[in-house]
Amino acid sequence: MNRRFSTAEDRSHHPGVVSPVTASQSQKAAAELPSNIAPTTGASPGTEWKLLLAAISASPEKVDAWPGRLQQNVDWPKLLRLADHHGVSSLLYQRVFRRGDSAAPAERFEALRRRHDINVHKCLFLTRELVRVLDALDSLGIEVMPYKGVVLSETLYGDMALRQSGDRDLLVDASNLPRTKKSVCQLGYTPRLALSEAAERAYMRSGYECTFDHASGRNLLELQWALQPNFYSVDFDLSGVFRRAVTVSVAGRQAKTPSPEDLLLILSLHAAKHVWGRLIWLCDIAQITQRPDLNWDWITSQAKALGIERIMHVTLLLAKSLLGAEIPSSANRTLWADAASHALADNIRIEMASGVSGNVGSFDYFRLMMRLRERRADRLRFLRRLTFTAGPGEWEAVQLPARLFPLYRVVRLGRLTARLFRGRSGTISAPPL
């Protein structure tokens, strides 16, 4: 793997370049930081990266090892940009706040506090809207499951404002989707994708979510009838996720959400889909692994049945090496034997530290998605579905009547072939990632 892959969620922030003077100061300070919180292979990461990992690690006491003079040696603007990019500004604020004002220059501490305050207000808004949507759907007898976002914040971190959230994700049975869409539209939400009836039916088979805008912002609600687009070839049984769901409290309201075991697999898949591009996703995994009652035997067997053992292994290896997540021996039996997972995790860890990013629509990205599958049958299924599954790109490129809709497979193949002839720098159109 030659480069990182940026996602729609992380393209707006990129680590800055350290000036020569700051770089030399950073190198001096880096030698004084705990070595076990940083990548162990490849080029030495900067002080700011090490410091961020220490602040959000599964062992917060590591922050106490920061030398006092790091206040002068750290490039704080770069550290804050890194925290923003990785969605961990509030976690960083919590750890810096606990150490007192002397942990950062006053103006940098104030900038971090403002970020946290903004996140608090946004989380309060998202939580209020979540409760409003859940109440409306409950009144219609429609069962949905919120997950990620503010639900993860409260259930994993004990504080809805410690995790930066951008929207609300609701799992819904496909049969209930039309009624659910109608209900949320009546609450003031507008679907982003307008499709014909034939395209809507096809999208239900190939896609996995419907995204809604609101007067308060774009992409504030996602209704998901699957966990990933069909072409990823991970056929998760969503009805089983609903059966195994647990009840949690969100701002005092009871709601169903996936069990911790399902959540570990679901979040591993989500992180892999975005090539583990943000540290907050690994923080979530680290929080789940701390649960003493986690059924690792079930997780391992389910990952094997789904053909995502390697994805789970890479996720756990990254959470362990970057954040010090504790992986119990019961989960280690196959973890350390998978050499391919270790090689992939090493590459991803190095490139996360270097801040290199790439394109999730590139051929390199989809080649990586195939390498992440341990079974040949799953790789071939992924390639076949990716090649022949038409999506919004094909429907917009060529207008076909409903009776000829199956021909969009040919349109899809033609568009991919054209990209191959133009060179591999092109991107592959796919259902929303």
Image (cartoon, helix red, strand yellow):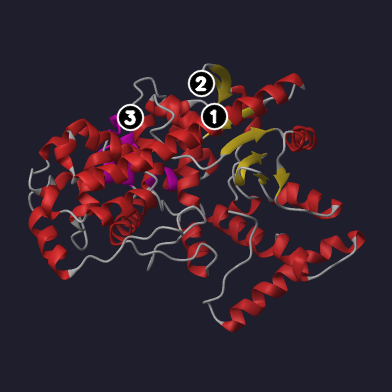
Query: Going from the N terminus, do you reach mark 3 or mark 1 first?
Result: 1
Amino acid type of the residue that numbered disc 2 sits on in the rendered structure: Ala
- Mark 3 or mark 1, whichever is nearer to me: 1
Give percent across and percent down for residue 202: 78, 52
Q: Is residue 258 magenta?
A: no
Disc nearer the start of the sequence (1/2): 1
Residue behind mark 3: 330
* Quadrant of the image occupied by residue 210: top right
> What residue does disc 1 label?
127
For badge 1, the amino acid type reads Thr
Q: Is residue 210 left or right of residue 290?
A: right
Disc 1 is placed on an element classified as: helix
Residue 408 seen anywhere in this rendered image of the structure = yes
Work out whether mark 2 precedes mark 3 in sequence or the reverse, and give the earlier one: 2
Residue depicted at 52% across the width and 69% down the height = 363
Instruction: Tell me the magenta residue range.
Output: 311-337
- Residue 221 on image: x %, y %: 62, 40
